[in-house]
Image (cartoon, rainbow, N blue to C red):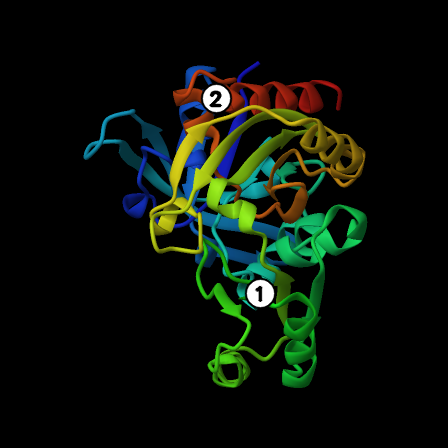
Amino acid sequence: MPLNIACQMDPIERIDIRGDSTFALLLEAQRRGHTLFYYQPSALTFREGRLRATGSTVTVTDKAGDYYNLSEPRTEDLSHQDVVLLRQDPPFDMNYITTTHLLEHIHPKTLVVNDPAHVRNAPEKLFVLEFPELMPPTMVTRSLQDVAAFRRDYKDIIVKPLYGNGGAGVFRITEGDTNLASLVEMFHAAFREPFMVQQYRPEVRLGDKRIIMVDGVYAGAINRVPAAGETRSNMHVGGRPEPTGLTKREAEICERIGPELKRRGLIFVGIDVIGDYLTEINVTSPTGIRQVKAFGGADIAALIWDSIESKKSST
C-alpha cells in the first residue's frame, strides 16, 4: 500500500548522492510507489496542537548533477503523513533537540524514523556509555587534570567533542605531546559541554568498521581505512571504504546491543567498531548503506523500508 512519506533533511541540493544514505532511502521509497514530501528542519511550525512543515513534493533520479526535482510547494500537516524520516545531520545541538520534541507530537501515529525521543536520549557518544564492557577505556570530562591523568595511564589518547560528526574536531594526543593544555583550552572555548577522551586503538590503521543495524539486527558493514597521515577514518575526511564481514567479537557486539536498539524504536543505526571495541552508536543520521550495496552486500535501504512497512501495516 503506497505511503505518504515526509523527509526532514538538510538542503537536498548539497548532498553527494554517491554515498548519501538519505538519498538511497528516497530512491527505494519512490521505487515502491510511496509519495515523497521534502522539507528542512527550519520549515517546522507548531500551532494549536498541529505540527506543520513547508516543503515540496520531491522526485529523485540516480544521476549525478540532475538527481532531484521539486514541485507542488505547500505546507503539510505532518500528522497526515504516514512516516517522517528524521534525517538531518548533526551537530546535535538545541535546534536538533527541539525538532525531536516537536516530532514527538505526531509519533507514533505518524511513524518517525528514528523515534524522536530516543534519538534525543541517545546521542552517539553518550549512548555508547551504557555498554562499558564493549568500549575501550573512556572518560567524559572538562578537566585538564583528569585528561592529563588519563594520558599518563594510557599514553596515547583521542580527544573529541561529544556532539560533532564526520570526524570534525577529533585529535590524537600522544605521550609527551606538549599541545594537550592548549587543546583542552580550545575545547573549553568552543564547547560548553564536556568532551570525550578515549584510549587510542592502533587497530584503527586497519580500519574503523561501520556496522549497520536494521531494527536491532545486523544488516551489513564496511571498513573505513584512514588516509595516510590521518588519524580519522571518516569518509568525509578521506577514509577509504572497503568490503568486510563480521568477526566473532563484532557479532557479539551486535547481539548485545541489538535488543536495546529495537526496544527504543531505533530502526536505522550505524555502530562504529575499532578492533574489538565499540566506539560510537550513530542514531541521528547514519550513513554507509550505498557503500555496502556497492560492494555486493545487502540492499539496506530495502531492508529499512521492509521494516517500516511492516510496522505501518500492523497499526
Closer-to-camera residue (27/171) = 171
Distance of label 2 from label 1 (alpha carbons): 50 Å
Residue 264 at x, y = what percent? 76, 41
Residue 110 at x, y = what percent? 65, 36
Circle 2 Cα neighbour tier, 10 Å, few/some/many (<14 / 14–19 / ≥20) = some
**Location of residue 121 (image quadrant):** bottom right
Residue 95 at x, y = what percent? 54, 64
Q: Earlier in the sequence, mark 2 or mark 1?
A: 2
Numbered disc 1: secondary structure: strand
Closer-to-camera residue (77/245) = 245
Residue most toward the left?
Answer: 65
Closer-to-camera residue (17/217) = 217
**Residue that numbered label 2 is attached to:** 34
Q: Amino acid at mark 1?
A: Asp
Left or right of 312? Residue 4 is: left
User: Is residue 310 positioned above or below 205 on the image?
Assistant: above
Q: Amino acid at mark 2?
A: His
Closer-to-camera residue (17/124) = 124
Split into 4 quadrants, where in the image is the N terminus? top right
**Residue that numbered label 1 is attached to:** 156
